[in-house]
Image (cartoon, rainbow, N blue to C red):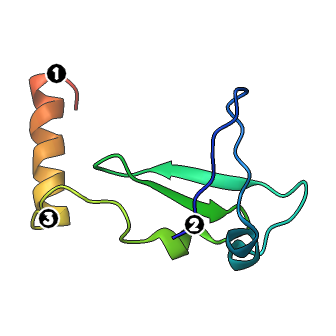
């Protein structure tokens, strides 16, 4: 485990092994993504967003609604509003 201390200015030095792992250097950006339970994902800005797929918890999966059902609901709501 690698650690770093927060300075009085709120700055943190990223350990060399982590910079090498993220393939970042001076003037590069890193991204902090808050997760549940006080955890944070740190990633290099150059990583594609697809690398993050599945990292965040989602609500319970619901069965997709069919196009037919969507059209039905849209027509019903439009009728309720007096639209054609």
Return the residue at label 1.
Answer: 81
Q: Are marks 2 and 1 in contact (CB under 8 Å)?
A: no
Comparing 3 with 45, the one in front is 3
For image coordinates 76% across by 77% down, the residue present is 20
Give the image quarter of residue 16. Answer: bottom right
- Count every numbered label the image shows and give the total: 3
Q: Is residue 61 above or below residue 40?
A: below
Q: Is residue 23 left or right of residue 70?
A: right
Return the residue at label 2.
Answer: 2
SS at mark 3 in the image: loop
For image coordinates 61% across by 64% down, the residue present is 43
Separation (CA) of disc 2 from disc 3: 36 Å
Return the residue at label 3.
Answer: 61
Comparing 69 with 56, the one in front is 56
- Quarter of the picture containing the C terminus is top left
Residue 31 placement (x, y as % from top left): 63, 53
- N-term mark: 3 or 1: 3
Characterize the local packing of mark 3: few (<14), some (14-19) or many (20 or more) Cα atoms within 10 angstroms: few
Give the mark toward the camera: 2 or 3.
2
SS at mark 1 in the image: loop
Residue 13 placement (x, y as % from top left): 74, 51
SS at mark 2 in the image: loop
Q: Is residue 51 above or below residue 14?
A: below
Characterize the local packing of mark 2: few (<14), some (14-19) or many (20 or more) Cα atoms within 10 angstroms: few
Residue 55 placement (x, y as % from top left): 38, 67
Give the image quarter of residue 64. Answer: bottom left
For image coordinates 77% across by 75% down, the residue present is 23
Residue 29 placement (x, y as % from top left): 77, 54
Separation (CA) of disc 2 from disc 1: 60 Å
Give the mark toward the camera: 3 or 1.
3
């Amino acid at each position: 485990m690698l650690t770093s201390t927060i300075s009085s200015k709120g700055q943190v030095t990223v350990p060399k092994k982590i910079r090498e792992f993220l393939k970042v250097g001076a003037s590069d950006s890193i991204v902090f993504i808050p997760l549940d339970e006080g955890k944070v994902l740190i990633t290099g800005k150059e990583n594609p967003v697809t690398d993050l797929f599945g990292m965040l918890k989602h609500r319970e999966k619901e069965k997709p609604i069919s196009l037919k059902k969507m059209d039905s609901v849209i027509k019903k709501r439009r009728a309720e509003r007096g639209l054609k």
